[in-house]
Image (cartoon, grey):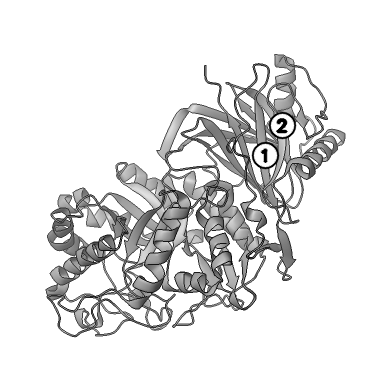
């Protein structure tokens, strides 16, 4: 207990002395705080020093690390300094904690200190990371444009700049969604199978496309855009409605042409679309109007297989946009792998599809089994999570809970589990909503990481924003997940049993009952090692980290906290 207290004291000092300048906080009574940004200040942008996101290579005697922490208690990306191998953590004053020896005995002492022990193996590699981000819906773009130009620029930097969350993945709807102010498609002229009246909407030209171009500017050209359609024009569907129904078979080719026309219109306005999905949440249409009351169109694996194999696949591949990635499913992961098993019975469809898009909304019903099985069945198809938000269920009566740490923890838990199960990227639903969770023509209000109060010209950064920050700011595109073996000590060790704990490679068995800590590790293109750790428990937890290239160290994760440990690998 004394040793743990010493570590806490030193790490707290380090936070106070060397942390990123803190945000202006505000509590709304939902468990934690939001960070408030406006035209003149935004603590979220006071990021790492110009040297980068890690403290640099070892000086020949020990390897330094930085530990970034966000907590329910109010820390937001606070930084503590430390060193490997020689068993001390230091603050800005250079104060050291217990045991500064540099031999193997010291390393073993440090390793044994942790209630949770993590062994990093950068030789064993898994999937390559594509990135993190979210959707530029009509609502998102409208909310951004409601802010003053100065505050709008602050928000764009908080989302896309390297000193902000550095998002690189953007999902743009093809037409209207529940996060629109009206129902529409790009050709609402009945029976226009030749698409003579196809035209982008005002929402695209005035709002979404300017935001996409601005995001590219702020990110330094690093953003990639994927597109998803919620529904075909009503006249192409069996029920002639925006909500529900399925595509008429005689409209399969027109719907394929519609997609290619969209790609051309966006390209003409400077937005290159990197990927297109087969359509948002195809099973929604079968739950209308009881549960789903917004834009939707139904598919089965068999009808989608026919459309892809005979129409959209060949149309896309012989178009000027034949390099565009094609992502299947774009729905809940509980549909995996059987949806793909049925679609890919046509080998042409399998060849057309590059990856698989999944949503998080019913993840509790599928503890990653579908993701693991899909990777095993189709290892050449990358997995990517393309939508998440809070309060999406009908029984979520309080839609927006500003400052909810519980919702932030759910994001963190899901990202960790997804990344440990071959997922290459993770995206939120609408990146920016108002304080009601909209606007939404269908009143399908939800809670997301960034909310704006246009009347006060303020941006509110929620715990969910910081859950994503602990990945997106440190794990750039091209990073690779590496092996992380987690050994968790028994919380209470019976006399004579020794407390050997259990080993859990990659966290695949989930958070053990005896421990609330889970983690994932990456190696970046800059040769930095990034270990993201989540302490979901109500008490501080000591964690030891060992890497055979640099030694061992021990840190304390505060109760209810997100943590990112960063260090550079030796160059020799």
Task: List the residue tagged with mark 1.
Answer: 67
Q: Is residue 531 above or below residue 135?
A: above
Is residue 19 found left or right of 379 in the rendered image?
Answer: right
Residue at 66 percent across and 28 percent down: it is 64
Query: Mark 1 packing: few (<14 Cα in 10 Å), some, or many (20+)?
Result: many
Q: Is residue 61 above or below residue 360?
A: above
Query: Mark 2 packing: few (<14 Cα in 10 Å), some, or many (20+)?
Result: many
Is residue 57 found left or right of 209 in the rendered image?
Answer: right
Determine the image quadrant of residue 214.
bottom left
Determine the image quadrant of residue 215.
bottom left
Q: Are the residues flagged by discs 1 and 2 in contact, CB closer than 8 Å? A: yes
Give me the C-alpha separation between circle 1 and circle 2.
Answer: 8 Å
Disc on res. 3:
none
Residue at 27 percent across and 49 percent down: it is 354
Q: Position of residue 296 (x, y in %)?
A: 33, 75
Q: Position of residue 157 (x, y in %)?
A: 54, 56
Considering depth in this image, is 253 or 114 the residue closer to the camera?
Answer: 253
Specify the farthest residue to the right: 2
Q: Position of residue 19 (x, y in %)?
A: 72, 44
Secondary structure of the residue carrying tag 2 is strand
- For the N terminus, the quadrant is top right
Q: Position of residue 234 (x, y in %)?
A: 25, 82
Q: Please indicate, yes or no, whether residue 407 appears anywhere in the rendered image.
A: yes
Residue at 35 percent across and 82 percent down: it is 183
Task: List the residue tagged with mark 2.
Answer: 82
Upstream in sequence: badge 1 or badge 2 = 1
Q: Please indicate, yes or no, whether residue 336 appears anywhere in the rendered image.
A: no
Determine the image quadrant of residue 288.
bottom left
Is residue 421 found left or right of 457 in the rendered image?
Answer: left
Q: Is residue 289 above or below residue 429?
A: below
């Amino acid at each position: 207990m004394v040793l743990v207290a010493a570590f806490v004291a030193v790490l707290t000092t380090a936070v106070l002395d060397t942390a990123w300048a803190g945000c202006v906080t505000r509590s709304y009574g939902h468990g934690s705080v939001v960070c408030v940004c406006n035209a003149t200040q935004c603590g979220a942008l006071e990021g790492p020093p110009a040297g980068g996101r890690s403290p640099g290579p070892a000086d020949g005697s020990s390897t330094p690390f930085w530990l970034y922490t966000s907590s329910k208690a109010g820390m937001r990306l606070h930084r503590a300094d430390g060193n490997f191998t020689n068993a001390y953590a230091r603050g800005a004053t250079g104060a050291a904690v217990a045991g500064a020896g540099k031999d193997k005995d010291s390393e073993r002492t440090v390793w044994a200190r942790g209630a949770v022990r993590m062994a990093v193996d950068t030789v064993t590699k898994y999937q390559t990371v594509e990135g993190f981000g979210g959707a530029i819906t009509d609502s998102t773009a409208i909310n951004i444009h409601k802010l003053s130009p100065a505050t709008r620029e602050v928000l764009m930097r908080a989302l896309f700049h390297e000193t902000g969350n550095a998002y690189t993945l953007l999902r743009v709807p093809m037409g209207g969604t529940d996060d629109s102010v009206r129902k529409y498609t790009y050709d609402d002229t009945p029976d226009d199978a030749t698409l003579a009246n196809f035209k982008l909407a005002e929402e695209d030209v005035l709002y979404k496309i300017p935001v996409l171009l601005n995001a590219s500017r702020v990110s330094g050209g690093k953003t990639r855009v994927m597109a998803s359609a919620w529904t075909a024009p009503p006249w192409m569907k069996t029920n002639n409605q925006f909500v529900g129904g399925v595509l008429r078979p005689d409209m399969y080719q027109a719907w394929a042409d519609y997609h290619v026309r969209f790609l051309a219109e966006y390209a003409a306005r400077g937005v290159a679309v990197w990927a297109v999905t087969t359509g948002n949440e195809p099973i929604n249409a079968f739950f209308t109007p009881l549960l789903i009351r917004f834009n939707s169109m139904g598919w089965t694996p068999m009808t989608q297989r026919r459309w892809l194999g005979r129409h959209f696949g060949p149309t896309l591949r012989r178009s000027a946009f034949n390099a565009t990635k094609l992502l299947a499913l774009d729905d809940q992961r509980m549909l995996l792998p059987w949806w793909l098993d049925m679609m890919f019975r046509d080998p042409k469809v399998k060849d057309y599809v590059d990856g698989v898009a999944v949503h998080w909304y019913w993840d509790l019903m599928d503890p990653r089994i579908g993701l693991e099985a899909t990777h095993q069945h189709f290892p050449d198809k990358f997995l990517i999570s393309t939508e998440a938000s809070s309060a999406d269920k009908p029984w979520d009566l309080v839609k927006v809970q500003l400052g909810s740490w519980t919702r932030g923890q759910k994001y963190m838990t899901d990202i960790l589990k997804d990344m440990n199960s071959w997922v290459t990227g993770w995206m939120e639903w609408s990146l920016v909503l108002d304080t009601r969770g909209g606007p939404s023509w269908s009143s399908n209000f939800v809670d997301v990481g960034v909310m704006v109060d246009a009347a006060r010209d303020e941006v509110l950064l929620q715990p969910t924003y910081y859950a994503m920050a602990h990945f997106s700011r440190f794990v750039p595109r091209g990073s690779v997940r590496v092996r992380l073996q987690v050994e968790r000590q028994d919380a209470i060790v019976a006399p004579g049993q020794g407390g050997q704990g259990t080993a859990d490679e990659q966290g695949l068995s989930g958070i053990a009952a005896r421990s609330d800590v889970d983690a994932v590790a990456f190696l970046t293109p800059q040769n930095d090692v990034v270990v993201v750790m989540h302490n979901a428990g109500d008490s501080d937890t000591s964690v030891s980290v060992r890497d055979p290239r640099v030694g061992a160290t021990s840190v304390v994760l505060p109760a209810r906290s997100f943590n990112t440990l960063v260090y550079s690998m030796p160059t020799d």
